[in-house]
């Protein structure tokens, strides 16, 4: 048994010894040439993670700050954003857009369901024009993976001028994501999810056309003024003081992700999901998400069917693991197993055996 509870939460996720030791290294000043070179290297490596040749950067903040930055930089005041809402996190982004004074329209499907591209197509063909379509690739609250490639193609075909803003918080590094091939404009994720690092940094990618759009929009804010932030970070010079130890660890982790290989990493996450769902099925439990194609590779939300979720979580605790007792309205009704990050299949199997 590990010397601490092993996290199978949908974030923060388990951080291994090597990465924790890197964070204990002596600090560098963030303006020292050695550290500037690390920041530049991280920006370059992030392009391989997002599969983009466009801009990538990071900031010391929670992912929610990037939701706000996306709206302030990419949707003009008085402009309309169309939010594909299917759970708590996609709903949060819509609320943020409203609080930023934008006309934030929701295209809502019931929790546990993904958006059929035809639904989006019908809305884009019939409703008022939108400046941005906003998608949560992996809705962590319910374990829904949106069909992002198809949704993106729908936006390009029916609203070619709309920017595509995507929360990839619990998908990048765990589920297939191709920023350039799929024509995304803005995507971001915190380090505490599929990258298996502590919370504290948020990585992001922005398209050239999004940066050009941002340049025409006023009141973009200060720290997360994207055109400036991208240029500074790419040059190794973050505006504010970054979380230096976490930047070292991110550099090493990006190296490790590249060594594993993205397709291999995506396949490992699918295998983790399949093992979790097979275990649940063998015990008469079903995932909250009905459509097989929409079942997340990084988090499974399992309907407890009246079973005692608290007791299950206690059993996990006693065996040295943490699982989640359900999010929001699903608390106590469905439990979540976060199978994201660096977990090998054998470790997940040990958790399932203990449960
Ligand atoms: C899909 C999704 N978006 C956004 C967030 C918010 O991230 P943060 O807590 O880093 O702001 C989370 C956190 O779980 C999430 O799962």
Image: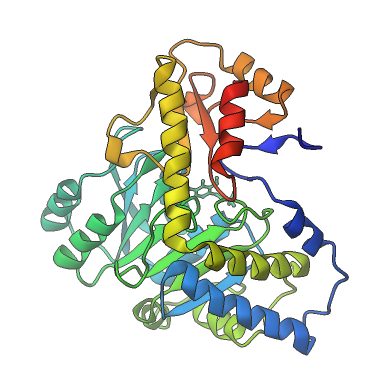
From this viewpoint, is residue 109 visible?
Answer: no
Please provide percent x and percent y for residue 55: 47, 79
Q: Quadrant of residue 108?
A: top left
Residue in view at x 83 percent, y 79 percent: 29
Looking at the image, the residue that sits furthest to the right is 26
Q: Report the colour scheme.
A: rainbow
Tell me the quadrant of the picture where the C terminus can be found. top right
Residue in view at x 18 percent, y 59 percent: 154
Total marks shown come to: 0
In this view, the residue in front, 137 or 129, is 137
In this view, the residue in front, 233 or 3, is 3
Compared to residue 282, the image places residue 199 above or below, namely below
Compared to residue 171, the image places residue 23 above or below, namely below
Please provide percent x and percent y for residue 220: 50, 73
Compared to residue 335, the image places residue 86 above or below, namely below
Q: Quadrant of residue 62?
A: bottom right
Residue in view at x 26 percent, y 61 percent: 152
Q: Is residue 295 left or right of residue 231?
A: left
Please provide percent x and percent y for residue 224: 57, 71
In this view, the residue in front, 200 or 7, is 7
Residue in view at x 11 percent, y 57 percent: 125
Q: Is residue 191 left or right of residue 184?
A: right
Tell me the quadrant of the picture where the N terminus can be found. top right
From this viewpoint, is residue 136 visible?
Answer: yes
Please provide percent x and percent y for residue 313: 63, 22
């Amino acid at each position: 048994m590990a010397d601490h509870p092993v996290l199978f939460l949908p974030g923060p996720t388990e951080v291994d010894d090597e990465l924790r030791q890197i964070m204990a290294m002596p600090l560098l000043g963030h303006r020292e040439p050695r550290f500037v070179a690390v920041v530049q290297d991280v920006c370059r490596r992030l392009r391989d993670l997002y599969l983009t040749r466009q801009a990538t950067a990071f900031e010391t903040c929670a992912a929610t700050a990037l939701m706000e930055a996306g709206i302030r930089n990419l949707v003009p005041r008085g402009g309309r954003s169309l939010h594909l809402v299917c759970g708590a996190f996609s709903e949060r982004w819509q609320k943020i857009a409203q609080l930023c004074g934008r006309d934030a329209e929701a295209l809502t499907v019931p929790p546990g369901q993904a958006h059929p591209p035809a639904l989006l197509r019908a809305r884009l063909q019939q409703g008022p024009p939108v400046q941005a379509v906003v998608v949560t690739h992996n809705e962590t609250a319910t374990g829904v993976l949106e069909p992002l490639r198809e949704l993106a193609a729908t936006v390009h075909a029916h609203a070619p001028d709309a920017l595509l803003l995507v929360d990839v918080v619990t998908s990048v590094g765990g589920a297939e994501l191709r920023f350039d091939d799929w024509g995304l404009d803005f995507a971001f994720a915190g380090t505490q999810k599929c990258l298996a690092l502590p919370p504290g940094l948020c990585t992001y990618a922005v398209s050239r056309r999004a940066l050009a759009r941002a340049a025409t929009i006023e009141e973009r804010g200060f720290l997360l003024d994207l055109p400036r932030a991208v240029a500074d970070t790419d040059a190794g010079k973050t505006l504010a003081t970054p979380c230096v130890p976490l930047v070292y660890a991110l550099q090493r982790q990006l190296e490790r992700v590249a060594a594993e290989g993205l397709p291999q990493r995506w396949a490992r996450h699918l295998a983790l999901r399949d093992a979790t769902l097979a275990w649940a099925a063998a015990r008469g439990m079903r995932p909250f998400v009905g459509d097989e194609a929409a079942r997340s590779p990084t988090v499974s939300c399992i309907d407890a069917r009246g079973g005692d979720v608290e007791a299950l979580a206690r059993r996990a605790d006693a065996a040295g693991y943490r699982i989640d007792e359900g999010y929001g309205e699903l608390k106590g009704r469905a439990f979540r197993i976060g199978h994201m990050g660096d977990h090998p299949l054998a470790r997940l199997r040990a958790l399932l055996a203990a449960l």
